[in-house]
Each structure stands twice: as structure tokens, then as C-alpha cells.
Image (cartoon, helix red, strand yellow):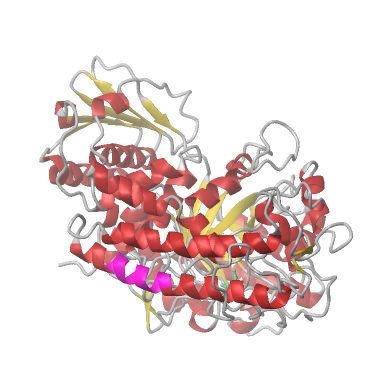
Amino acid sequence: MKNYADLWTGYKARKSAGDIAVLKKFYLSGGAESDKIVINAVKELKDGLKAMLGIDPEVVYGQAAGCAPVANGKDIQDREEYTVSLCDDGVRIDAKSGSGILYGVFDVLRTVSCEKDVKAVYASGKKVRPSNPLRMLNHWDNMDGSIERGYSGESFFYVDNEIVIDDRTRDYARLIASVGINAVVINNVNVKQAASYMITDRYFDKLAELGEIFAGYGIRLFLSLNYASTIEIGGLDSADPLDENVIAWWKTKMAEVFDRIPTLGGFLVKADSEGRPGPFTYGRTQADGANMLADIAKEYGAIIIWRCFVYNCRQDWRDRKTDRARAGYDNFMPMDGDYHDNVILQIKNGPMDFQIREPISPLLGGLKKTNQMLEVQIAQEYTGHQIDVCYLIPEFKEILGFRTYCGGDKDTVADIISGDTFGSRYSGIAAVTNTGNDFNWTGNYLAGANLFGFGRLAFDTELSSEEIAEEFVRMTISTDDAVVKEILDILLPSREIYERYTSPLGIGWMVTPATHYGCSVDGYEYDRWGTYHRADHLGIGVDRTDKGTGYALLYNEPNASTYNDPEKCPDELVLFFHHLPYTHKLHSGKTVIQHIYDTHFEGYAEAQQLAEKWNALKGKVDEDIFENVSERFTRQLSNAREWCDQVNSYFFRKSGIPDEKGRQIW
Ligand code: GCV
């Protein structure tokens, strides 16, 4: 008996939709029969179809006789794309690599699992090209087994500073490959203690084994790197990127690392951030640091992913000039074009830090000559700790759809990170993951929708939030139409509901310091982290206009003018950009203070409705799932009530303005 759930790779018995005879034979072309990814793909196909429909398909490699391919070789430009089509006596999957075959197989299994009509779905050939080259999960797992910002148990990669490889590891690779993930960083970006020794003989054998397991599912292994390894494990007294001894040390080290872990794709680096070491210590730029490592890694076909989350975390709260939101842009933009071609800048969104609502980082659409990827967070650090239901895919869709006006037709964030806008060699999207060793992997079973959804969206940014949520529900909870509808009605509005009962109008941050769960309006107000709401008895918000920190002007036009003007700025971001009186009228027609009251009362009431909806599903979904989510809802409601009452009371007491509707404020 496994001590973890199979989630969407559980493959329970399914009703056959339409004529399924075609599933008895598969023609695979593109990957070699002996390729371990193809071997895994075929096993998955056979296991999945057997469990769902009782079919044991025959698998034929190469061209099917009398069955013309829908897409020819020329059309298949990317090695991971695939085409699934039908022929007289079977299904064919055409690809250029084992990964393409694997993704095609998972496409078919998803179709069957969602009880869709196979013949209808693939009648005219379904060709899918991944939207993004890199589709990555970043684990913030520590080697002692803890997880920074983890809300679903301990790490399944580490126990007591040792790497664990077991059935769960293999099933994790299957699970994430099935939604299209092709890269994974297995250790926290805050690389300390034992993790600094990942690049030593102590861990090479296990890492090599892990890398092979992932490679069998088309996933490349990456490690977070301690920038000051030369000092911490190398015995040098410097980590200056221009120092010859430092460079020589890294040359020897990387030769050893790539020899011992041949599948390693490269490194993720958090430098000069929140106490982590970096090139600034030596008066060098971020580009100096990244390029030094990248030049050495290049020989091994590896890449350096360098985070842009560099800011002053020791700010004086009295200082109104320094603006944390600007920091990424100010630190990285001046060197656009200087980063070498195997460096990728990983840009956290938002520009502050994964709040429920922030504008898009101005580096996206600012940088034009640099490989870049977007970083989002499915670990619900500021969005409810996987206690509160918060389906994040609608937020990610907004980010991806944002027009940066960086020039040309292809100017959305999705265009940029796909590599299309600037013809980048490397690009993509990473999520700080929400997994742990809890039975259901993600703490709240419904948080699995974010893991599933991130992968699906990263693979195909055209998919809608609704489609993704529906696939998740059908594949993991129920295929009953009525149940599916109820759960979609919980998931789809959950992000906006969470936003309504927490921080208003883009201001963010009113969270309990350190844990980041629960309300504490002034928790960070007089602290060093650069995260302020600046509320007084007259108004609230941070002036980031040309008269304030100037942040709004970092955007391309017309975004800069829109954000700079409170009359044009979208309501949901207005306090991010402006300090406004409580009596300021929003586009909605409400005043700021009335908006605060209304949204908080509504958000709490809506959270109660979500819980009621879930409770009505008792007996209609698996008992374990029901109990898990039900228990979380109990905690969500008490959290939502605190947020509602504390925020409303705080602003009533500051402003002295009563609620127009006379509801109870404490
Ligand atoms: C991994 C925030 C989090 C930290 C995290 C950091 C980062 O500050 O609170 O836990 O550290 O972001 O993204 O590096």
C-alpha cells in the first residue's frame, strides 16, 4: 500500500466515451524503441489503458501502413512537440523524441481519464507544441527535511541530510512529467549547511541516480548553488567572480560535477539577496557573477539561472525613497545585453514578492537582449498556506496575457517567456512548488489543482483556467458532471475571494510577519523589509508615481501613464501605485474605504459559501478527500473572519468613516 496518492496518474476505471476500439493499437514514431523515455511512455500507456478501460494495447514502432501522418517532419520543429492522430486500426503518436512520445501518451490518457470521445478529440489530428522551452519546478526543500514555505509536510527528497530515492521519487517524476514539466530544481535557493555540499562527493552518486530517474521522464535535474562555495566548501577566502583563483576553483569543480552527474542541466542561483552571498560583496555586478559561472558551465551544455530577487532587506521604514518594487529593475536592467547566452534571468512576479495582487514586473518587457524566465509561486506562502482554497491559474493567466508594449505584435509576457518576442535561446517559466510528503502531496487536496494547473499552463499557455480546473477535477476527484460543476464553482472564484478578504486594492503585505499566514495589518509596517501600506487617518497606499518613487515610469507606454495616473490606474492596483484619501472614488463608483468594507464582508461571506458548497459534496466524493478539504475549510473560515474583522476595524479606527451599510465593525 502506497503512503501517497496517485492524484491524476491514479487511472481509475472509466466509462468509454464513443468508439474506443481504436485504442487497441498504437503506432509510435519519433523516439527510439530502446529510449528509456519511450519505454516509460509505453508502460504508462499500457498501465493506464488497462486500469481505465481494460484495454491492453498493441504498440508498433515506426510508420503505420496505410496511415498518412498528419504532420510531417518539417512541421515538427520542436523536439518535444507531438501529434496524436487516428488511422484505420489505431492511434498514432508522431514526435521527434521520446519526450514527444511521452507527452502524446499522457495526452491520450488524459482524454480517456476525462471520459472524452477519443475519436472526436483526435479526428483531425491534434498537434501540440509546448509554449515554453523550460517548464520548471523549484523546490525550496532543505536537506534536513524541512521545506521553506512548505505547507504539505516534509521533503520527500531529504531526510537527515541524506537524499532519499524510493518509489515516491519515481512516481513524482511521472506525476510532473504527465503535466509537461521538463526541469526541476531539488533544493532551496537559500543554499546553506549540508546543501552547500551537494556539489561534492558526498552526494554525487545519489544525485546521478536521481538525475537518471528524472531523465527517464524527460525532466532535467538542476541544483541551487551556493554562490560562495569557493569559501564555504572550497577553502578560498574569496568569491570574487573576477578572481583567477575563484575561476580556477569553479573550473575544477564543474568538471567534477558534470562528470559525476551527467544529466545535470545546470544551476539556479540566489545571490546578494536576503543574506545570501553574491558578487556585490566584491564590487562586481550581477552579470559578472552569472557570466563567470555560465562561461564555465557552457562547456557541459549547462545553463545558469540567476534570480532577479535582489533588493535591500534592511531598509529603514522611515525612508520613502527606497522602493523594493524597483529593486529588480534597478539591479538588472542596466546590464541588459551583458548576460552571456547560457544565462537566464529568473524574474519573480510580482516585483515585490508573490502577493495576491501585484503589477507585472517591469523587467518583463524591459529586458530585450537577455534570456529570461518568469517565476511564480504555487506554494501558497501569501495566499493561504494550502489551508485556504486559492486556485492560482487565473492569476497566472493574467500575468501571461499582460501586454508589455515592448515593441512588435508579440509583446505579452507569454510571448516573451516563450522566446518568441526576442528570439531568445533559453526562456520559460518556473514555479516554487507546493509539494511535500503529505499523503496527498499538497496539503489541501484542492491545492493539487495548482500543481496540475501550473504544468498544464506552462506547456500550453492557451489553455483556459476553466479547462485546466475541469481536467484536474475529472482526473482526480470525480467524473460526475454535477460534482465537477460544484468543485469548479469552488476553485474558479477562489483567488478573487481570497483577495477580497485579505489585502485591498493591490496594497499587499498585511500578513503575520515571518509565517505570512493570517492578518496583521501593521505587521510589516515599521519593519526593515520594504513592505509598507503607509496608512494614516487620511489615506493609504504607496506613492510610486513620478512624484513618489518613480516606479510607475519603469513600464513602457501606455502602461507607465496608466499606472502613474490614479484616474486611469486599474482599481485592483490603485493602492500599489498611489497614496489616496479614503474618500477617493474608484472606477467602481465606490470610495476606497467603502471598497475595503464591502470586499471584506463579501469575501468572508463568499468563503462561507464555498465551504457550504463543499460540505454538500459529502458522500459524493471520496471520504478522505472530503474530510481533508472540509477540515481546511474550517480553518479557512476562521482565517477569513479574522481578516475581515481586523482589516475593517483597523481602517474604521484610522479613518473614522462609518460603513454606509451599518454592518458590525469592531
Ligand atoms: C527562499 C521570500 C520568502 C523567503 C524566500 C524568498 C525568495 O522572501 O519569504 O522564504 O526564500 O522570498 O524568494 O528567495
Question: In the figure, 266 relative to 642: above or below?
Answer: above
Look at the image and tell me in which quarter the N terminus lies. bottom left
Q: Quadrant of ligand 1?
A: bottom right
Q: Where is residue 481 in the image (x, y as percent from the top left)?
A: 25, 42
Residue 52 appears in view: yes
In this picture, residue 621 sits left or right of residue 330:
left
**Residue 159 x %, y %:** 36, 80
Relative depth, front residue between 352 and 188: 352
Q: Does 283 sit left or right of 19 as displayed? A: right
Q: Which residue is drawn at 74% across and 81% down?
A: 314
Q: In this view, does 71 lie above or below 582?
A: above
Q: Could you tell me which residue is drawn at 46 percent across and 28 percent down?
A: 76
Residue 322 part of the magenta-drawn span: no
Q: Closest to the observer: 402 or 298?
A: 402
Residue 404 image point, x, y percent: 71, 43
Q: In which quarter of the image is residue 190?
A: bottom right
Quadrant in which the C terminus appears: bottom right
Q: Farthest top residue?
A: 66
The residue at 83%/57% (across/down) is 545
- Which secondary structure class fits the magenta region best? helix
Examine the structure image and report whether residue 632 is included in the region drawn in magenta: yes
Residue 360 visible: no
Question: Residue 610's quadrant in the figure?
Answer: bottom left
Report whether 81 appears left or right of 594: left
Q: Magenta part of the protein: which range?
A: 628-637
Residue 592: x, y in percent? Answer: 70, 60
Residue at x 67% of width, y 58% of height: 295
